């Protein structure tokens, strides 16, 4: 979903749209510039579905981006960065680099991708109010459709299961510690 992450980042955080959002927040909510920037600077995109090192390397941004990786993926990225021809500076603000159009054209044939990639009519209305005029399509999911969107369900289930496993380990550990303390 690198293309989706890039599109979301462009809409919200690109240098050419950021100022529009700041002004919108100020006008809509009666905020000072300082308050609007404070809020905006604390919103981050958390890109998902990164399978290969390049998927992470192409989501680098100095602002409004948080990359979290599983340990095995972190190791893959480290190995990639240790290659002789690797230059970290090639990936500075890589989230804004243009991705291959031919891959996008292939992906646009899949309805599930289009639902996540394109804007929805309701989002287009908001973008117009913000002052963003670029055409981001109109076949995207509506806000109320996201909870039943297959990839969202899968991700939420994975996060929920991981949390439950973690919680169980923590509870088990505290029980063991509690027993050890009682022995003292």
Image (tube, rainbow, N blue to C red):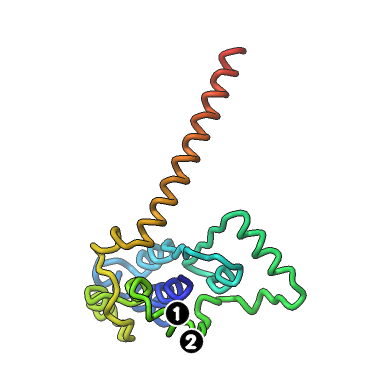
> Which residue extends farthest right?
84
Tell me the element at label 1.
helix
Q: In this rendering, is residue 146 above or below 7?
A: above
Residue 89: % across, % down? 65, 77
Q: In this rendering, is residue 80 above or below 108?
A: above
Report the residue marked by disc 1: 15
Instruction: Name the image quarter holding residue 137.
Output: bottom left
Around disc 1, counting alpha carbons within 10 Å, would you say few (fewer than 14), some (14 to 19), or many (20 or more)? few
Which numbered disc, 2 or 1, marks the residue closer to the eye? 2
Report the residue marked by disc 2: 102
Disc with the residue nearer the chain's start (2 vs 1): 1
Q: At x 32% / y 72%, what residue is drawn?
A: 115
In this rendering, would 111 be left or right of 168? left
Q: In this rendering, is residue 102 above or below 70?
A: below
Q: Nearer the viewer, residue 116 or 34?
A: 116
Instruction: State whether residue 61 appears in this view.
Output: no
């Amino acid at each position: 979903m690198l293309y989706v992450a890039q599109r979301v980042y462009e809409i919200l955080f690109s240098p050419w749209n950021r100022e529009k959002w700041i002004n919108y927040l100020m006008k809509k909510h009666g905020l000072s510039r300082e308050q609007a920037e404070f809020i905006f600077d604390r919103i981050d995109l958390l890109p998902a579905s990164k399978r290969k090192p390049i998927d992470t390397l192409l989501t680098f941004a100095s602002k409004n981006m948080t990359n979290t990786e599983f340990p095995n993926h972190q190791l893959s990225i480290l190995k990639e960065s240790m290659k002789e021809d690797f230059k970290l500076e090639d990936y500075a603000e890589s989230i804004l680099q243009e991705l291959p159009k031919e891959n996008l054209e292939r992906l646009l044939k899949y309805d599930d991708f289009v639902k996540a990639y394109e804007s929805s009519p309701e989002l287009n209305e908001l973008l117009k109010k913000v002052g963003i005029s670029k055409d981001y399509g109109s076949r995207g999911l509506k806000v109320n459709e996201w909870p039943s969107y297959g990839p969202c369900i899968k991700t939420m289930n994975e996060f929920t299961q991981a949390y439950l496993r973690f919680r169980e380990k923590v509870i088990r550990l505290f029980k063991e510690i509690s027993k050890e303390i009682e022995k003292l």
